Amino acid sequence: MGKHENMTMKKTFTLTFAALLAFGATLTASAQENPKVIRVAVSGAGTGGKPASSGSILTTAHQRGDLEKEFAKDGIKVEWTFFVGAGPATNEALALKKVDFASQGDLPLIVARSNGLRTRIIMKRQQFDKTYVVVPTSSPARTIEDLKGKKWTVQKGTATQLVLNRVLKKFGIKEEEIKLIDMNSDSQTAALSTGDVDAALSSSKDLVARGLVRRIYLVDDPKVNPPGNLWVSEEFEAKYPQIVQRFVSALVRTAAWSADEKNRDEIFRLWAKSGTPYADFKEDYKDTALRDRQNPLLDEYYTTFIKNSIAEAKEFRFIRRDVPFEGWIEPKYLNTALKEEKLEGFWDEFDGNAVRKKKSGAK
Amino acid sequence: MKKKMNRQFKSAIGVGLIAMAGGAAAAQPTADELLKQIQALRATVESLQKQVKDQSESLAKTKEALPTGVEYATTTDLDGLKSDLEDYKYSVARDRQYNTALSTRGVTIGGTLTGSYTASTLPSAATSNRPYGTPAENSFNASATLSFAGNLYKDYDEGRNWDYKLGLSLANPKFANGAASTNSPAPGDSVIKLTDVYLQYSLVKSNGGLEDPKLTVTFGQQKIPFGLEAQVSDELKPTVSTAQFLGTSALSQLGKRQIGVVLRGDWNPTVDYGFNYRAPLIEYAIGVVNGNGDNTADDNTRKDWLGRVAFTLPVDYNSPFRELKFGASYYSGWKVLTNTANNVVADAAHSSRKGIDIYYNHNPIGVTYERADGVDDALLVPAAANYRGTQPIKSSGQVLTVFYNFGDIAQWSKNLNQVGKYDDFWPTTSQVYYRFDRWDPNVYAAKDEIFKGTVGYNYFFAQTTKLQLGFTRTTYPNGSGKTSASDLTALFQYGF
């Protein structure tokens, strides 16, 4: 083989290799343009394990098929999973790379972050929820103080546990001063019905309607009840930022629809498909504006709440390590969506104390 | 409102008529008086007409204020609803009485149905008919298990619960032409055996959450806490075959369920509520059992003792060392030695087993290794009557399994396996594995080891169903005079 031939071979090989690399790169790029499936996890399921949930922008979008409509034109499937095991189950799914977007309460979200799971919070799902401290009907308890030293039940690891800790703290009761029993929601219902536990947190009215429990305290404090979170995995965001944008934009449109009072009845009917009665939502939302509750903004109220939750999670020893806050909340998708949909200023912002900062100017 | 109007109208007419009747009975009224009466009546009628008009307008306004398309429920509608509800209540009560299986205590019924096919290049029975071109042995098999488990006492105060389990297994003889032993049914029959039969009591508080240490005592027939594979229930076994050292002719006490009392506990768990993860730093177990296997009375007066301790690295869920566990087990017991000359019990000989194990299951990858060594006193001359001299026989087994999961992986996670669904939930997970299994029945004897290398593929679909394929190559040391063999096993199992 002559020198020339050798050179030609080398050149041919180099060119071929370069072409293959370029082809591979093109393939990779095109393969990453769009995912085939977007996997959305909801931390919780409806009554009796129904694949449905209620009370937020995300669940409304699920019932209306808003995300499916958005991505149908590209042949992208939206796959929903409703984890009965709530936030902790969603965390395991994230650790195993089985979920791209998810809704969660603050405690599991924070624990996951402290454990190194990488997420970006892209919008709020809802805020200013209400819940009640309930006791069995036969209970002599009339106040929270009466429940000192009694058996409380909560599903540990969920955001409700942090709410309970906040309620107890508000009344100067330490966790050691009550007997805390770990139960999922179905077991809680059974134990409350039979009077085997003394108290629980519950927003549902069904046990009240059946005469099995009494509500003794309304937890209607926006600094106690956490706002709902929605995150995307960092891995998905890095691969498909354009999909994240479309996802958020679609939900912002859903949020705008959800803020319209003329849809109040329809929203409650949609949510009632989860098994929570229509009347519960009607009562829960009485005298409150949909626009305030179904508010997607990552405002000062939201960021302050999450920072406080991190501190509380440490105080109540749910986490040992620090939670890096910097870069966790990513508002750019929401801001772009608000601009594109001409919804800037549509929702009010609230300050760290949940006080309205600015009256909204609906456009 | 309408009723009220009617009442007022009738009252007015009544007053007028009474007035007229009264007048007629007394004296004839004058024209003026009659005129006044008529005027009074007219005023009353006009007042009533105004009321009717006002109320009609008010009703019209109310209707206008309400959203269009809204329909109102009437008393008849509500009566219909009440009727439907009563029908439903009756239907539920009747179904419960006649068409629902009832139990005196809460019970969960579960089980598995298994169909399998095995082909081997070597016959297992001496008289295997082998048409030309077929494997030496190939057979379809079927088996089933059934279990009833529940709670006898639920202690809401502290979680010191009483639980129970009853398990049954049903199998046909492996080979229709196999030699029947005393416990085997005749070909064509099936055998039903009790498997798990126990009561379990929590000795410590257990409802405070994952951070509570556990301590239970279990009475009855149960799997024993030795090593890894001896404790795993059939539906969770990754491989079709069990480790050789658990076989019936090997360290047999370990592979069988035993009847006795076992205390199991743990201490200082690492808890990660963010994932419902719990990994006790120390797990321990200690027990006393008959040592003669399941559904069999003890054959000697001495009891067998066993103990196990395991250490799991105290790391969070997301650590790469999650679920890295090291364990050590010990079993000491007695078994009857019978000479083969006249089948007379010669002695109760001592047996001991020592085991170590390593377990690492960091989804999606996993590695398990365990080694078990046994020392069994055996008759020096089994064929001699009235001779009781014994010698220790040492045996040793090792099993290494490496596996990798891919797909939904829901079957391996309680969190992921419980999702809200209207229809059936069919997560799919694949698992590939390799297993190396070495068994040396007598460490002092040369060239009697058996090596089994297995590659397998498991396909899990639905929540409780699996298809397993395994190809095993069995080899022996050079010069052992034994022929290597290959086996192919396919197993389909679904749980309910």
Image (tube, rainbow, N blue to C red):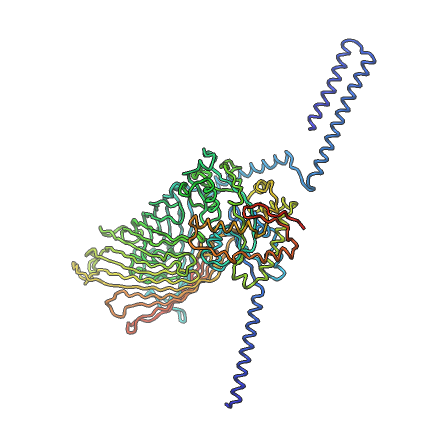
Q: Quadrant of residue A78?
A: bottom right
Which x, y percent locates residue B411? 45, 56
Near-viewer residue (B79 or A21) = A21
Near-viewer residue (A9 or B240) = A9
Q: Is residue B116 above or below residue A224?
A: below
- The residue positioned farthest toward the bottom in the image shown: A2
Q: Quadrant of residue B351?
A: bottom left
Q: Residue at x 53, y 80 (%)?
A: A14
Q: Residue at x 54, y 83 (%)?
A: A11
**Relative to residue B408, is residue B35 drawn left or right?**
right
Which x, y percent locates residue A170? 47, 41
- The residue positioned farthest toward the right in the image shown: B31
Which x, y percent locates residue A42? 53, 52
Near-viewer residue (A315 or A200) = A315
Q: Can residue B151 be seen in this snapshot?
A: yes
Which x, y percent locates residue B109? 42, 48
Near-viewer residue (B214 or B395) = B214
Q: Can residue B494 be seen in this snapshot?
A: no
Q: Quadrant of residue B243?
A: bottom left
Q: How many marks?
A: 0
Q: Is residue B317 above or below residue A46?
A: below
**Relative to residue A107, is residue B201 drawn left or right?**
left
Q: Is residue B303 above or below residue B359?
A: above
